[in-house]
Image (cartoon, rainbow, N blue to C red):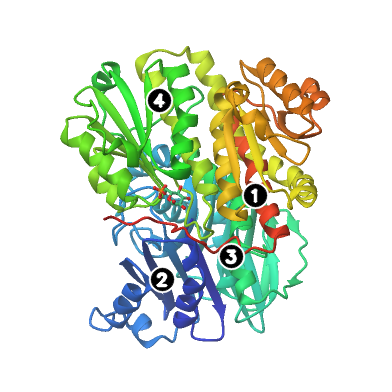
Amino acid sequence: MCGIVGYVGGRPCRDLLIAGLEKLEYRGYDSAGLSLLEDGRIESVRAVGNLSNLRAAVADTEDRGAVAVAEAEATIGLAHTRWATHGRVTEENAHPHSDEEGEVHIVLNGIVENHSELRRELITEGHEFSSETDAEIVAHLIEKHYDGDLTGAVRDAFAELRGHYAFVAMHVEHPGTLVGARNECPLVLGIGEGETFLASAIPAFLKETRDVMRIDNGEIVTIDADGAIVTSADGEPRDRETEHVTWDEDEAERGGYSTFMLKEIHEQPDAVAETITDRLPELDAIDLSELELTPEEVRDLNRIIIVACGTSYHAGLVGRYAIETWARISVEMDVASEYRYRDPVVGPGDLVIGITQSGETADTLAAMRLARERGAHVLAITNVMGSQATQDADSVLFTRAGLEIGVAATKTFTSQVAAIYLLAGWLAQSRGTIEPDRMAELIAEMKALPRKIDETTDALDPQVKAIARSHYQGRFFFYLGRHIGLPICLEGALKMKEISYIPSDAYAAGEMKHGPIALLDETTPVVVVATESPVLEKVLSNMAEVRARGADVIAIATEGSVDVAETADQTLFVPRTDWILQPILAVIPLQLLAYHTARCLGLNVDQPRNLAKTVTVE
Ligand code: G6P
C-alpha cells in the first residue's frame, strides 16, 4: 500500500511532492524518497521512517552535493512512500529506483510477480542491482528498451511484467515528461493550469487541482505540463475525459467513501491480492521461502497451536480447518489472554502461530514469548513490518493489507485468512499430504479470490443495506453456523457489537438446542452462514428450527444453493469457490451488515467507543 506522486509543470516541485506524500501518509509506509530532474541530471533523496526523516535528509542534501534537491528549483520529479514487501526497510530499498547510470528513475506500487526471473535475465545481460526490491527491475528494463522514446520503452517493459502494480518513470533526456503504467494498482492524473500531477490517489494533489483523469488497467500514460496522452498497452490511443471532483479533503482521504471502514471493505480485493500474488509463482506450488522452517522441521511437526485476540483469533479459527484438512496436522486454538496464563504444555516440535495485525497486542506477544521460551518454533502473522511480533518470532509471514484506519478490522482480517490459506497449502505441499492436481485446483481458486471478493462486495452492498434498514432497531442479533461457517459467525457478531453496539451472539448451530433457542422470537434477526460445506444439510435443519420459532432468517449461501434460499427469509449469495475458501467471501456480507446497521443508527464507525485499535505492549 505504497504512495506515488509525480509532477511536471512550471513550478518548483520538491515541496509539492512532499506535500503530496503527506496526503498519502494514511496509507501507511516505512520509508520514503523523491527524485528531481534539473540541468540534465537526476538527484534522489531517500530515508527510512516517516516524512520528517525525508525532510531532514532533503535538508542535508547540500552537504552531499545534491544541488537540485537543495535549491528546490526543479519543475519535474517523482516521490514515493514505501510499505516494504520485497526486501527489508532500508534506504537502498526505498524508492525511487534507477538504472546504474541514474538515467531512468521509477517509483512503483504493488508487486512484480516475475521479478526473480527478470532479475536473473538482466544480470546475465550485465545489469547490476543496488536493492533487493522487485521495483528496481522496472528501471533496468526501461533502460534496456530505451532508444530515445521513453513511452515506447515503458510499453516494452510493461509487456514483460506480471503481477499487479502501477509505476511512473522519468528519464534524464526527457525533462518535460513522465510516463506511467497501470496494472491493477491505482493511478490517477490531476490536470492543472500548465502542470500535471500523476499519483496513486487523488488526495496527493487535491489542494492543487480538482480536475482528475483516471487511468485504467492495462493503460500507459505520458504526461507533460500541458496534459496527457493515454494509450492501451499496445499503443492504441484512448480517449479520456477529465472529471471535476467536489470532495473535501477528508472525503478525498477516504477515496470518496463516506467512512474509512467502507473504503477498507472495498480495499479487500487489493489487500488479498497483495498478500497472495507473489507467493503463488507457479500453477501448483506455494512459495513461503521467507519462513525459517526447514523441510525436516515441517515434516516432524507434532502439532500447531494458534494464539491471537479478537478478529485475529477468528482468522486463526478459519485457518485451523485449512491446516487440518490439507496438511493433516492437529491444530489447537486459544485466545492469547487465556493461553499465556494457563501454564501450557508446549515445547520443541510444536509450531506456535501468533496472529496479530498490529504486531503489538500485549497478550498475543506474551503468549508467543512463553512458547518460544519453552522451545516451540514461533511464527508471527502480522501486517506491520518492524512491529514487536516480528522481533519476538522465529519466522514471520506478513499480510499486506496496508494501514487500517477504521476501528473494525476488515481488510486485515481477510488478508490474515488469505495468509493462513497460503500457510496451510505450503505445509501440505511440504509434508506431501496433498496431490499436485488438488494443489493446482486450490491455487487457481486462491488466485480468483480477489476478483470474487470484489464481485461479492459490489453485488451485496445494496442488498445488505436494505436488510440493515429493516433490522437496525432490533435489540439482539443472533448468528448461527457450523464447521467452517462458525468462525465467520463469531466475526460477524463481533463486528455487530463493536460497530453498532447492538448485543449479538454467535453460536455453533448444533448447540442452539441446548439453551440459546429460548432467546429466539419473531423480533430476532438470525444470520446463518450456510455456504457449501460438508455440514450444509445440518445447517439447513437448524434454519428450519429457527424459522419454527418465528425468527427472521438471513442466510449467507453459495450461489445456486436453492435449498438455502427456499428455507431462509432472505438469502445473500456469494460466489462459489472451494468450500474451505468460502469463509473469506462469506464474511463480506457480515462486515457490511454491521456497517450499514451502525450507519442506520447514525453511529461513527471509524471512531472507537471503548476500544483501542492497537493494544500496546504492557
Ligand atoms: C483490538 C481491535 C480488534 C483486533 C484485536 C487484536 O481489540 O479492536 O479489532 O482484532 O485488537 O488486534 P491485533 O492487532 O493483535 O490483530
Write down the residue under mark 3.
Answer: 201
| Mark 1 residue type | Ala
Q: Is residue 423 left or right of residue 92?
A: right
Write down the residue under mark 4.
Answer: 426
Write down the residue under mark 2.
Answer: 34
Picture coordinates of residue 585 (x, y %)?
63, 36
Marks 3 and 4: in contact by CB < 8 Å? no
Marks 4 and 1: in contact by CB < 8 Å? no
Picture coordinates of residue 326 (x, y %)?
46, 18
Snapshot quadrant of residue 196: bottom right
Tell which of 49 and 539 is nearer to you. 539
| Mark 2 residue type | Leu
Tell which of 275 and 214 is nearer to you. 275
- Residue 449 vertical placement versus 226 (above, below): above
| Mark 3 residue type | Ala
| Mark 4 residue type | Trp
Q: Disc 4 to disc 2, how far (Cα)? A: 38 Å
Q: Disc 1 to disc 4, how far (Cα)? A: 34 Å
Q: Is residue 372 left or right of residue 161?
A: left
Q: Disc 2 to disc 3, how far (Cα)? A: 17 Å
Cβ at disc 4 under 8 Å from ligand 1:
no
Q: Disc 1 to disc 2, how far (Cα)? A: 41 Å
Mark positioned earlier in the residue sequence (1 or 2): 2
Q: Secondary structure at mark 1?
A: helix
